[in-house]
Amino acid sequence: MRNKFYLGLAVFMVCAAMFVTKVSAADDFPLRVKFPDMKTISTEELTKGYDSTIIVDVRSSVEFDVARINSAKHVPISKASFVADLEKVRGKTDAAPMAFYCNGHKCPKSYEAYGKAAEAGFTNIFVYDGGIFDWITANADKATLMGKTPAPADKIIPESELKKRMIPLDEFKTKAANANAMVIDIREPVQRKVIPDIPNLRNIPLDQLLGQLQKKQFADKQLLVLDAVGKQVEWLQYHLEENGYTNYNFLANGVDGQ
């Protein structure tokens, strides 16, 4: 009886451990539950296969310029020519594995890229959902951050620091009314279907703004920046910090989130 009890207890503990592992994996990589048929590749596996795997960065140019895997091919998922551009990187049924990545565990772009590629007939493809920041943490020598290689992992801006800069609309409007405030809408023209009623608002698309920041044009201003949904400002923050700006805030959730 005693042996059967301990055997049953051991089986229970193993099952419990497996359950906890699965729950933990689902929490760490929530999109795997949504796309269970898509093959994923871990940081460890991609590191081992780094020289033989075609790595594809599917993010925007701004994101790619801030941080990237060194060997990555840049094929933005947002372009209508994505599949055609991907064919220029690798044949649909070539033997070399191909892995798509974006910004990390909760970023859907790499899964979207896998879906489009698979539908177009690409084989031997994977989602690297660890994303750019897991990669930098594990392989700084094979990554670039703000033009520096090896990527300085200590320069990754924590999500908590981004959140500190996010302020609600009422507070944003109050700050915008200050004489020293520079209020900037970094959305592209196609995104500006709604123009918020915010004092002193001016439009400077993100690509144009980055050049002005490098020239320290707004060094003496209180910068208040808004985008569509609070995502572009995450990458703008790297340029602000790199160029020594400290007096800045972003509109929480962007214009579309109000």
Image (spheres, rainbow, N blue to C red):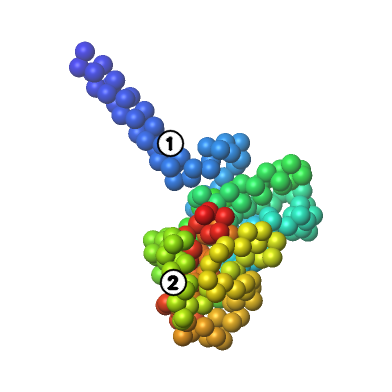
First of labels 1, 2 by sequence position: 1
State the residue at coordinates (47%, 67%).
173
User: What secondary structure is found at the residue carrying circle 1?
Assistant: helix
Rendering quarter of residue 75: bottom right
Q: Amino acid at mark 1?
A: Lys
State the residue at coordinates (61%, 46%).
111
State the residue at coordinates (76%, 52%).
83
Q: Viewer-proximal residue, 180 or 10?
A: 180
Residue at numbered disc 2 = 175
Q: Position of residue 170 (x, y in %)?
A: 44, 62
Rendering quarter of residue 158: bottom left
Q: Viewer-proximal residue, 12 or 50?
A: 12
* Label placed on residue 211: none
Q: Viewer-proximal residue, 120 or 61?
A: 61
Q: Is residue 232 visible?
A: no
Q: Is residue 121 visible?
A: yes
State whether residue 152 is above or below residue 50.
below
Location of the N terminus by quadrant is: top left
Q: Residues within 10 Å of mark 1 (few under 14, many from 20)?
A: few
Q: Amino acid at mark 2?
A: Lys
Distance Cα–Cα, label 1 vs label 2: 46 Å
Is residue 62 left or right of 242 when viewed as pictured? right
Residue at numbered disc 1 = 22
